Image: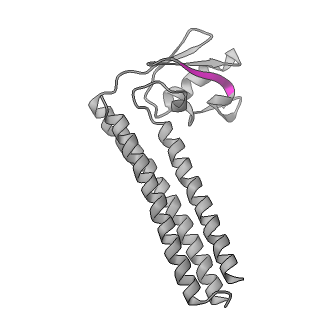
Amino acid sequence: MASEMIDALLEDAADRMAKAVHSAQHEFGTVRTGRASSALLDRITVDYYGAQTPLSQLSTISAPEARLITVQPYDKSSIKAIEKAINESDVGLTPSNDGNLVRLVVPELTEERRRELVKVVRHLAEEGRVAIRNVRRDVMSDLRELKSEGQAGSDDEHRAEVELQKLTDAKVGELDKMLAAKEQEILEV
């Protein structure tokens, strides 16, 4: 009975930690590396008739060339709002439009901009680590609750805490590997 509850808690922790890692990986994709990618615009929301709407729901985003991203709005009247949202975002790209299409030329990254982007990526990784540690803290609290209610012995609790720490270390290690790869990708000239 107690081991089933503990296993369920650990399984839930593993699932939640995996989601935190996946989320961080997705956020890494939104950081510019010098190559055009539609994922760069994933975090951008546009004020569309008073509602904050993700850019991807208002337009078709593509990267037809290595240094060019195009944004084709479904509604031509939203082109100014899209341009404004891109300008106000942290992607560091300047939009130009021809009335039908917004073009974003991805310039070569300067050394200074690369260092700034590494800081952004490290911050995103730290947010991922915090999310993983928060999951660990929540599950530790649940384990202590089980012990205090008498549903699990201190040996069971200790074993579960050791397993939870191993899981936490593994997920943080996974995140650190992704961070190292992204930093290398950004600093690559």
Furthest residue toward top = 98
Q: Quadrant of the N terminus?
A: bottom right
Q: Residue at 64% across / 87% down in the picture?
A: 152
Nearer to us in this view, 4 or 44: 4
Within the magenta stretch, is there residue 85?
no
Tell me: residue 179, above or below residue 153.
above
The percent coordinates of residue 61 (x first, y second) are 60, 23
The percent coordinates of residue 167 (x first, y second) are 51, 65
Q: Quadrant of the C terminus?
A: top left
Q: Quadrant of residue 154?
A: bottom right
Tell me: residue 14, above or below residue 179.
below
Describe the colour scheme in one phrase.
Answer: one colour
Q: Residue at 49% across / 65% down in the picture?
A: 168
Q: Which residues are magenta?
A: 58-63
Q: Residue at 60% across / 79% down in the picture?
A: 143
Asked whether, in this view, residue 189 is left or right of residue 138, the answer is left
